[in-house]
Amino acid sequence: MANPPGYPDTGAPRWVRVFGIIALVLILLFVILHLTGHGFGHMH
Amino acid sequence: MVMTPRLRKFMLTAHVTSSIGWFGAVATFLALAVAGLISPKAHLVRAAYLAMELTTWFVIVPLALVSLLSGVVSSLGTRWGLFRYYWTLVKFLATIVVTIVLLVHTQPIDLLARVAAKAPVFTTDLHSRQLLMVLASGAALLALLVLTALSVYKPQGMTRYGWRKQHEQRALSQP
């Protein structure tokens, strides 16, 4: 998508990118933890 | 959409109260989760998990939902908007993720409370869930602290949408 006139070419600020990476890692960790059977309330 | 000052202050009060209340309730939950994990006293462990279930359903979940809803209404009724600035957008998305994670974790919380209500002692196969309660509430506390800091510091950065809207408004206001 093209940037609107005058919008900085650098895109999202650095803190947003850092946030995104941390969030992605945490979500992946959460999904892996639950797919491996740790965490949900079922008794085995 | 612009709110009247009275409504804006009411929504802001609801948002700040519910958000800080959410943080405090999760801190209490963390203390109970640690007590449930490490205490050698069986009665204290059982009481902790029963209290955690009550705290979750009657304090944490309602406060999380009020915080999310009041945050959306507050942002839409002010110049900040919901999608115009990165800090409001990040805060909105992070609150949704934290709320979903919270709702997912009500399952093991309910399980631990059910066991606490029936069994006199906890078996070792529940240890991973007990540990998960400590880790999840610790992570939630950290996430809520970051969300509070975002609201206070309001880091710079306007989204493409916000930039376009500002451009349109400037064009409309010029004769």
Image (cartoon, coloured by chain):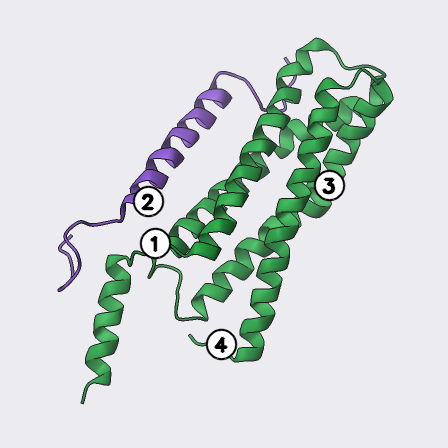
Chain colours: A purple, B green
In the current view of this chain or complex, which residue is farthest to the bottom? B175
Gap between marks 3 and 2, in whole Å?
A: 34 Å
Q: Is residue B30 above or below residue B80?
A: above
Task: Identify the residue position indicated by label 4 in the image.
Answer: B3
Query: Chain letter of disc 2?
Result: A
**Residue B138, picture quadrant:** top right
Task: Identify the residue position indicated by label 2 in the image.
Answer: A15
Q: Residue at x 85, y 16 (%)?
A: B120
**Label 1: element kind:** helix
Task: Identify the residue position indicated by label 3 in the image.
Answer: B55
Task: Identify the residue position indicated by label 1 in the image.
Answer: B86
Residue B51 in the image: x percent, y percent?
A: 78, 35
In the current view of this chain or complex, which residue is farthest to the front? B153
**Label 4: element kind:** loop
Q: Tell me if B23 is positioned left or right of A15 in this view.
A: right
Callout 1 environment at 10 Å: few (<14), some (14 to 19), or many (20+)?
A: many
Query: Chain letter of disc 3?
Result: B
Q: Do residues under tags 2 and 1 come within 8 Å of each other at their CB atoms?
A: yes
Query: Chain letter of disc 4?
Result: B
Callout 2 environment at 10 Å: few (<14), some (14 to 19), or many (20+)?
A: some
> On the same chain: label 4 and label 2?
no
